[in-house]
Image: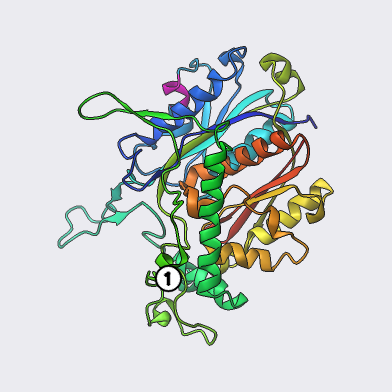
């Protein structure tokens, strides 16, 4: 098997829902990330890229028709460079990185680009097609921004509860209080704000020039959801988002169910953004003429009951570390996507040998944002840049995935 290297990783700043990137199409965001990635490696002939892998969780709007290929064309790559789009929901971007790494490892490619993109702002409404030629009555539109839609009636209703209710169930299982979740969320904002102040994201950020209706374009250069002024007092004022006194509405009552603890403050927001990584083998390194950030060591994937989807990284990380011949004590950093504070704290509770001090040292998705298809690629790039700054070490990027899956990638330097 060939050794696989991550040469570089870039991402757009993450925009809030209907925020700074609302006017930019997702295929343009993806193309921007690819274009900026290659601009940092001027010695690479773009025609040497053998495939472009991009993750996307929606696929119902402007990113339809294979956004991986569309982004490659919009970025100005030669038409000879193919592209593919992959979907593993919230881990789509990481899945793209893993698929690119796998192709290089087995010799199917020497140089590849991988990444992910999502515009949750621009996600459309969809109208199911009737099975009758001239239906009477009203039709229902479904939002594709997040969550379940057009659910198969054969699916167990326990598996199709809202993601936030799943986070509540994890909080029930591990007795995670509202206060603990808010404290975790506050720490995420504080760490992210400190990382911004120290310039720790500078190496991975590719600012976006956003056209305006009037006047010159505006440079969108920083993650938009980070709140340096976040406080526990302000967080405590928010009402629970999923349990509001009728926790049984998502199915049969649960004996352990208490009042709601998941709020907008201790969950990730809705976001827009894109990320891209350049991966090579040894021969590819000669072509790019750069020192890599890190090398790919191992991967792990797992499945779990969908109503506890947030705990799936527990087994995925364990499997990936086992394949790499590593343990939690070998880790320098672990980036676990913060879909919900309860979900992260639940995973940590099931890793008794893990040191939480190395968890998301630059903040996580609660502060930075979670543009679904892009987040996995963002995490992989963030881990790679942290290892490069350290000069050595072992890092993990991992995400939980709706419908009950976990995905993990181990990187080393």
72 part of magenta stretch: yes
Question: In this orientation, which residue lies closer to the viewer: 145 or 70?
Answer: 145
Q: Residue at x 69, y 14 (%)?
A: 287
The colour scheme applied to this rendered structure is rainbow
Give the camera-side residue of 239 and 280: 239
The image quarter in which residue 316 lies:
bottom right
Q: Residue at x 42, y 70 (%)?
A: 236
Image x and y of residue 59, in percent: 41, 43
Residue 407: where, in percent of width, then height? 63, 51
Q: Which part of the image, by quadrant, shows the N terminus? A: top right
Q: Nearer the viewer, residue 274 or 108?
A: 274
Q: Secondary structure at mark 1?
A: helix
Q: In which quarter of the view is residue 65 placed? A: top left
Q: Which residue is mark 1?
A: 236
Q: Residue furthest right?
A: 325
Q: Position of residue 149 (x, y in %)?
A: 37, 59
Side (left or right) of 131 relative to 107: left
The C terminus lies in which quarter of the figure? Answer: top right
Would residue 342 be visible to someone looking at this image? Answer: yes
> What segment is highlighted magenta in the picture?
71-75
Q: Residue at x 41, y 29 (%)?
A: 208
């Amino acid at each position: 098997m060939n050794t696989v290297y991550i040469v570089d990783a870039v991402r757009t700043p993450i925009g809030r829902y209907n925020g700074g990137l609302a006017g930019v199409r997702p295929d343009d965001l993806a193309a921007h990330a690819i274009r900026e990635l290659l601009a940092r490696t001027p010695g690479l002939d773009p025609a040497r890229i053998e495939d472009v892998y991009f993750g996307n969780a929606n696929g119902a709007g402007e990113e339809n028709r294979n956004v991986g290929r569309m982004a490659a064309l919009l970025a100005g790559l030669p038409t000879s460079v193919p592209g593919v789009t992959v979907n593993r929901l919230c881990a789509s971007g990481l899945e793209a990185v893993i698929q690119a790494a796998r192709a290089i490892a087995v010799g199917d490619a020497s140089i590849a680009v991988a990444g992910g993109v999502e515009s949750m702002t621009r996600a459309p409404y969809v109208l199911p097609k009737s099975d009758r030629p001239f239906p009477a009555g009203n039709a229902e539109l479904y939002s594709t921004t997040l969550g379940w839609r057009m659910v198969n009636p054969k699916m167990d209703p326990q598996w199709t509860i809202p993601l936030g209710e799943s986070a509540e169930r994890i909080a029930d299982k591990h007795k995670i209080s509202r206060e603990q979740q808010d404290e975790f969320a506050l720490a995420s904002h504080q760490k992210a704000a400190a990382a911004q102040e120290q310039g720790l994201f500078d190496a991975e950020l590719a600012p976006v020039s956003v056209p305006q209706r009037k006047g010159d374009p505006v440079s969108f250069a920083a993650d938009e959801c980070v709140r340096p002024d976040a406080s526990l007092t302000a967080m405590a004022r928010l009402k629970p988002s999923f349990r509001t006194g009728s926790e049984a509405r998502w199915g049969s009552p649960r004996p352990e169910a208490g009042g709601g603890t998941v709020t907008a403050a201790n969950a990730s927001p809705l976001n827009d953004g894109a990320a891209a990584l350049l991966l090579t083998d040894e021969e590819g390194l000669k072509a790019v003429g750069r020192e890599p950030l890190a090398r790919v060591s191992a991967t792990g994937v797992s499945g779990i009951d969908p109503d506890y989807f947030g705990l799936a990284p527990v087994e995925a990380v364990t499997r990936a570390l086992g394949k790499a011949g590593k343990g939690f004590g070998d880790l320098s950093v672990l980036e676990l996507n913060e879909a919900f504070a309860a979900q992260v704290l639940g995973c940590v509770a099931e890793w008794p040998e893990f040191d939480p001090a190395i968890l998301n040292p630059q903040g996580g998705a609660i502060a930075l944002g979670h543009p679904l298809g892009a987040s996995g690629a963002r995490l992989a790039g963030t881990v790679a840049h942290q290892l490069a700054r350290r000069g050595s070490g072992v890092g993990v990027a991992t995400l939980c995935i709706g419908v009950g899956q976990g995905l993990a990638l181990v990187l080393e330097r």
